[in-house]
Amino acid sequence: MQARIKFSSKRFLLALMLCACSIILLQNDDLAADTSFTFQLLGILGGLSVCFVLFLPSLFIKIRTDGDVLQLAERCTPRAKLPLAAVYSCCFVYTALYFLLPYTEMFHTKYFPEASPCLITVVLLACCVYAACKGVNVISRFGVFLFAFALLTNILMFGGSVSEVDWGHCTFALRGDAGEFLQNTVYFVTPAFIIPIFACLSGCVSNFRLRQPVFALVFTGIKYAAVIFFICFALGDYSRRQGFQTFLLSRVAHFSTFAGIESFYLALSTMAVFMILSLLLCCITKSVGRSGELRPIILFTGIILALDVAATYLDPVREVLTNPLLFVVLTVIPAAVIPMIWYFIGRKSNAPKN
Amino acid sequence: MRRKISIVLTIWSVAFSALLLTGCNTSRRIETAAIIENVSVNRQDGEIIYTFYRLTDDEKPWGVDVRADSLEEACALAEESYIPHFSLAKLELLMIDEDVYEEVMESDIDFISTRPSFSPIAYVTLCDDKTMESFRENNRAQRVIEEQLILLKNHNPDVSINYLSIFNQFAREGEESFTVPFVSSEKELKVSEFEIRRKK
């Protein structure tokens, strides 16, 4: 029912942009340590260029059919509905855990070492179930509020760190090799997780323009560049001594006697992860053909929770669920491969028959 | 309607249990007396003494002396033997006596850099024996020193006044020395610069 109500594409892309921007808050030694700032900028450029290429099939489908890949698949190949739902739900569950695990780790190590990570997951997932029941439209409205809050947090974080900037901490010279470039690029491909969300839910939005995703990626790049700049030049070598460098940046930010905005950081990262998980749950229910229904949401939330508990206590499970290369593979399949296949199938079925 | 009520009740029960399990119980309550505001390091009778000054409104600082070779050891001992629920999250100033800085400064800053609970922008300064004495006697000395440190930083941005900048200075390669603040107390508290040579 919720999927049939169309809302502004701008609002939807704003929510996706915030999700893409905010995941750098969970950056935890993912970038190659001995690379210079300029070299990391090249990584951002490379990663976001890959993201744009991955965006193209879903954009073509949206522009051509004004629908999403699931609607197109249902129309062209009704028999493929089940395998498609299985692939999409598997990828979305993996993506949800890929962000949930670093978030609970950050919360556990930086704020409440005594609290059980599983408890944090349960509380967050309970909120996400409620949001997913409300639908994409309501979540994207929350994105507008989050945008204002993210702007305030970023102004405080960057403005407060300016006094600690020291040009001697890092160099502008290109320093790094091909392996390090690949490592950085793989990390900066992470925002591509918004593409499968767009591919699944873009049928709910109207007034779509090509410039909207381009702007979202450019803004994400600027945000990443700003964070990397302050990590390199305000934190310097200190940033490598602890995990979650953006958290450290929020602790360093200060205006005269007002010091440390880590509570803003925690609030922003919590709301960002909440929005990502809620959108992913919406995508899962849409892919199984039951948008907004409580039962499938509860079922998949239970699966996410079970895997999260397993990853908390079993290191091999955790390694698999937080593997960046596997994440990229499981993002590329629903983001580009499946939409591309159905784009060509759709064109073929619409082609005039001789 | 019934569904909405059940969802609201579920959220409330989860939130309530979360509060109970994450910090709203008496066992996790941190007494104000356990919050450490300043730490000083000096030598007494040939041994290194770390003094943890607790947060207080009194005129006279409330310090606990711990004999240890490093801040890491001193923190462990303080928590174990002297101050239960010991917290360094609000630490504002680390004062190191000029006699002991060569032995403890680099290793202590290195230890601090690995602890998320320490604020990276807390002040670090060297001082002489008289300043250490006046710091033990009067709670106002800390405010005066912090004001002087800010003035010094405004006057000379190259001087390293906090953990973050001092750690980065120790880690930096190429330059031979860097400056940190030095508090002396001949007639009144005065902050000047002190040059520290890096180990090669």
Image (spheres, rainbow, N blue to C red):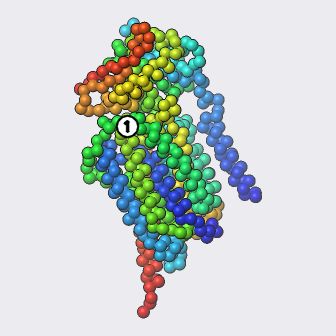
Can you say whether A331 is above or below A253 in the image?
A: below
* Residue B111 placement: quadrant: top left
Drawn side of residue A281 relative to residue B92, left or right? right
Chain at tag 1: A
Q: Residue at x 59, y 27 (%)?
A: B30
Q: Residue at x 42, y 92 (%)?
A: A354
Along the line of sight, which residue is nearer the eye, A240 or A265? A265
* Residue A144 placement: quadrant: bottom right
Q: Position of residue A280 (x, y in %)?
A: 53, 59
Q: Residue at x 37, y 37 (%)?
A: A165
Along the line of sight, which residue is nearer the eye, A226 or A111? A226
Q: Residue furthest bottom?
A: A354
Residue A186 seen in this snapshot: no
Number of marks in the image? 1
Residue at the disc numbered 1? A165
Q: Position of residue B42 (x, y in %)?
A: 40, 13
Q: Residue furthest right?
A: B1
Along the line of sight, which residue is nearer the eye, A335 or A228? A228
Q: Amino acid at mark 1?
A: Val
Q: Secondary structure under badge 1?
A: loop
Q: Position of residue B193 (x, y in %)?
A: 34, 20
Neighbour class for label 1 at 10 Å: few (<14), some, many (≥20)?
A: some
Q: Residue at x 35, y 56 (%)?
A: A45
- Figure quadrant of the N terminus of chain A: bottom right
